[in-house]
Amino acid sequence: MENNRPTSQEVEQTEDIVTKARANKKSIIAVCVVVAVCVVAALVYVMISQSGSKKADELIAKADAAQNDSIALALYADAAKAGYKSGNRAKAEMGIRLYQDGKYEEALKYLNDCSLDDEVAEAGVETLKGDCYVNLDQLEKALSAYKDAIDDADENPEIVPFILIKMANIYRSQGNFDAEAKAYKEIIDEYPTYVNNTRVDIRKYYERAIASK
């Protein structure tokens, strides 16, 4: 199966945007847009499209090949009504596409009804839920979704630190500098390879959080 996890270049590009973001709502929303494209969409394709529903398989195959976005969306919506893996993958696809269209509440309806059996894909779906909630100015729900994403990621050294950075930005926007510092400290202590291999100075942002208390 083709490896569709985000490349190191994609992760680095996204990290730059996240860590340079100012501590305000607009910057957090901007980060979430990048995440949807660079992380979540890539993670969900880890799923193998196997299903007990032949109709759903056929609809997804047509949707994947569709050149017209509106036609693809309609096909995914039909496939999402089916069960099994294909139906759930279609729900994830609907969530991604609706998110990119700025239809966050509609995206959540599909994402909340989506159940995938791959840890990485589940982490991607939960991350996208968090991004939807951020754009709806429901930051506590966003944090809850990001925590679920971290649980699903099961200490994945590429995904978990990235989500922790997103959480740190929310905490800073809320003035919760203790929680912000704790998030950065977890990255430093638990994911030293991530810290050493990125162009972002995580320690600098940790020290900023400490100084802001």
Image (tube, rainbow, N blue to C red):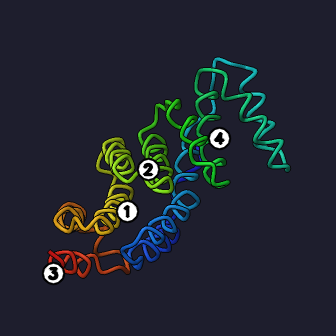
Query: Does label 4 or label 2 sit earlier along the sequence?
Result: 4
* Residues at circles 1 and 2 in contact by the CB criterion of under 8 Å: yes
What SS does tag 3 mark?
helix
Q: Callout 2: 10 Å neighbours few (<14), some, many (20+)?
A: many
On screen, 86 above or below 151? Answer: above
Between label 1 and label 3, give the one nearer the viewer.
3
Q: Callout 1: 10 Å neighbours few (<14), some, many (20+)?
A: many
Q: CA distance from mark 2 to mark 3?
A: 27 Å
- For the C terminus, the quadrant is bottom left
Query: Does label 2 or label 3 sit earlier along the sequence?
Result: 2
Residue annotated with mark 3:
211
Residue annotated with mark 4:
94
Query: Does label 1 or label 2 sit earlier along the sequence?
Result: 2
What SS does tag 1 mark?
helix
Q: Nearer the viewer, residue 118 or 181?
A: 181
Identify the residue shown where x is 65% and y is 47%: 98
Would you identify the image quadrant in which residue 109 lies? top right
Q: CA distance from mark 1 to mark 3?
A: 19 Å
Residue type for callout 1: Lys
Query: Does label 1 or label 4 sit earlier along the sequence?
Result: 4
Residue 184 position in % (x across, y down): 23, 67
Residue 37 position in % (x across, y down): 59, 59
On screen, 100 above or below 154? Answer: below
Q: Nearer the viewer, residue 116 or 204?
A: 204
Residue annotated with mark 1:
166
Residue annotated with mark 2:
130
Q: CA distance from mark 3 to mark 4?
A: 42 Å
Q: Which mark is residue 88?
A: none
What SS does tag 4 mark?
helix
Query: Does label 3 or label 4 sit earlier along the sequence?
Result: 4
